[in-house]
Amino acid sequence: MSAVPAAMRRARILDHIRERGAATIADLARTHAISSMTAHRDLEQLAREGLVVRVRGGARALESPAPHPTAWEARIAQEPEAKAAIAAHAVTRVPDGATIFLDASSTAHALALALMEGSPRELTLVTNSPFIAANISAEAVHLVVCPGELDQQTRAVTGAWTVDFIGRLNFDVAFISAAGITLEKGLSTARSPIADVLRAARAQAGRTVGLVDATKFGRAALVTIARAQELDELVTDSALDAETVEEYRAAGVRLVVAPAP
């Protein structure tokens, strides 16, 4: 079996299919050093996401991919290896039987996929992301989807209903992301309703873990969600330069750099 994180493996399989136009399960298993069952599951996942068309014994590339991806699709496609590395570390922060919150970020989506790998543990997963919810199929996971208004661009459920609903729950761990992070402005987002939801989740969580890839450091968006020092842990990827890592740690931020896969 391959040690490559699932999200990265599927990205490579997708590239393989797009380059050749099609691929069989046997071909993918041989090329990527995985079992036929793993190749089958990966193709099923890619098909559910609308990235390939399943055919008998394999899959083929889409004949006419959309020329203009949605904002959500563009976010999913950005920094897949970094998000996979962050997700691989974040999985270790989910205890068996825990109740966790996942926000509607693409990095939280990578974590959701990582949680579904192998034999998913028993846990309660609350999310304000319909896209994440659609990818949770394990019977061991009690899935709770927040009510509210759907932002078509960010694919996040937000609003007063969402904040009120979250305020009635308790989480062992809340996993949140952001559009940017600086020591001066903390984690920030361009949309106030998203900040409201993430603040509500933090308030109900025993621990809050930030999931922020290296490209977002040094950016400050419109609304602050939380100071970096207020997080119980901030997880990033190995592309973040050593000087920035030391600067954040010296400022009291519990920054963890997830190793490259």
Image (tube, rainbow, N blue to C red):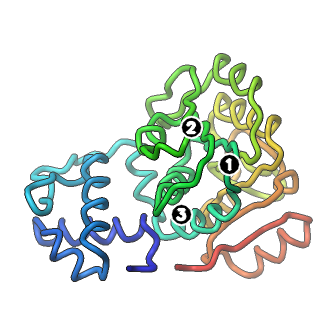
Q: Which of the 4 quarters of the picture holds residue 223?
A: top right
Compared with residue 115, is residue 162 higher up or lower down, i.e. above or below?
above
Q: In the image, what residue type sits under mark 3?
A: Lys
Residue under the image location 87 percent in, 51 percent down: 230
Determine which of the numbered discs, if any, sits on residue 142 in the image.
Answer: 2
Q: Earlier in the sequence, mark 2 or mark 3?
A: 3
Residue under the image location 67 percent in, 54 percent down: 96
- Left or right of residue 125, residue 110 in this image: left
Q: Earlier in the sequence, mark 2 or mark 1?
A: 1
How many angstroms separate mark 2 from mark 1 (CA)?
Answer: 10 Å
Compared with residue 17, is residue 48 higher up or lower down, i.e. above or below?
above
Q: Position of residue 122 (x, y in %)?
A: 59, 49
- Left or right of residue 227, residue 257 in this image: left
Q: Which of the 4 quarters of the picture holds residue 228?
A: bottom right
SS label for mark 1:
loop
Circles 2 and 3 in contact, beta carbons < 8 Å: no
How many angstroms separate mark 3 from mark 1 (CA)?
Answer: 24 Å
Determine which of the numbered discs, if any, sits on residue 83 in the image.
Answer: 3
- Left or right of residue 112, residue 199 in this image: right
Estimate how packed mark 2 is, as few (under 14), some (14 to 19) or many (20 or more) residues with alpha carbons within 10 Å.
some
Q: Earlier in the sequence, mark 3 or mark 1?
A: 3
